[in-house]
Image (spheres, helix red, strand yellow):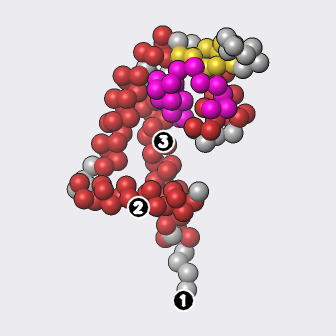
């Protein structure tokens, strides 16, 4: 049995889909003053403001230096602030500023529009199957 050319593999298709999604998301997020991935950090803080960096890194599945750079950039943009924990001064917590809170509605709207674009022309059944398959692929990789 001969192997397919790399361009015809599922891996290649997955990379193309991920790049297309990332590029589209980057365009939409840039209009809100955000970079890819920053919306995920905001989503976690909208749900639980005041998390510590290690909790955020774990939730976002990113390395600590990546998160530190992201937090610094978002702090500089006025979306977040770091504060020492009131009970343990060695711990730094990440809090939303008013500017960070004000992004919840536009980011959620943009995220929902991106979801609609991704699922356009798929039936409910196809969407269900796609979700199930993507979850299985994710499980295979973790």
Q: Contact (CB < 8 A) between labels 1 and 2?
A: no
Does residue 37 show up magenta in the picture?
yes
How many other residues sit within 10 Å of disc 2, few (<14), some (14-19) or many (≥20)? few
Snapshot quadrant of residue 59: top right
- Determine the residue positioned at 50% across, 24% down: 48
Residue behind mark 2: 133
Residue behind mark 1: 1
> Of discs 3 and 1, which sits in the foreground?
1
> Of discs 2 and 3, which sits in the foreground?
2
- Determine the residue positioned at 28% across, 59% down: 126
Element carrying mark 2: helix
Residue behind mark 3: 23
Quick one: which residue is furthest to the right in this view?
90
User: Eyeballing the image, is 62 above or below 130?
Assistant: above
Snapshot quadrant of residue 60: top right
Cα separation, mark 1 vs mark 2, equals 25 Å
């Amino acid at each position: 049995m001969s192997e397919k050319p790399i361009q015809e593999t599922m891996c290649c298709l997955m990379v193309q889909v991920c790049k297309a999604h990332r590029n589209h998301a980057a365009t939409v997020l840039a209009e809100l003053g955000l970079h890819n991935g920053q919306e995920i950090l905001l989503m976690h803080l909208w749900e639980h403001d005041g998390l510590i960096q290690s909790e955020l890194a774990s939730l976002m599945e990113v390395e600590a230096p990546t998160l530190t750079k992201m937090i610094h950039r978002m702090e500089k943009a006025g979306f977040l602030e770091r504060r020492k924990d009131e009970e343990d001064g060695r711990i730094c917590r990440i809090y939303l500023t008013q500017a960070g809170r004000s992004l919840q509605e536009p980011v959620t709207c943009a995220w929902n529009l991106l979801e609609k674009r991704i699922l356009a022309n798929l039936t409910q059944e196809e969407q269900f199957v796609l979700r199930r398959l993507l979850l299985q692929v994710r499980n295979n990789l973790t």
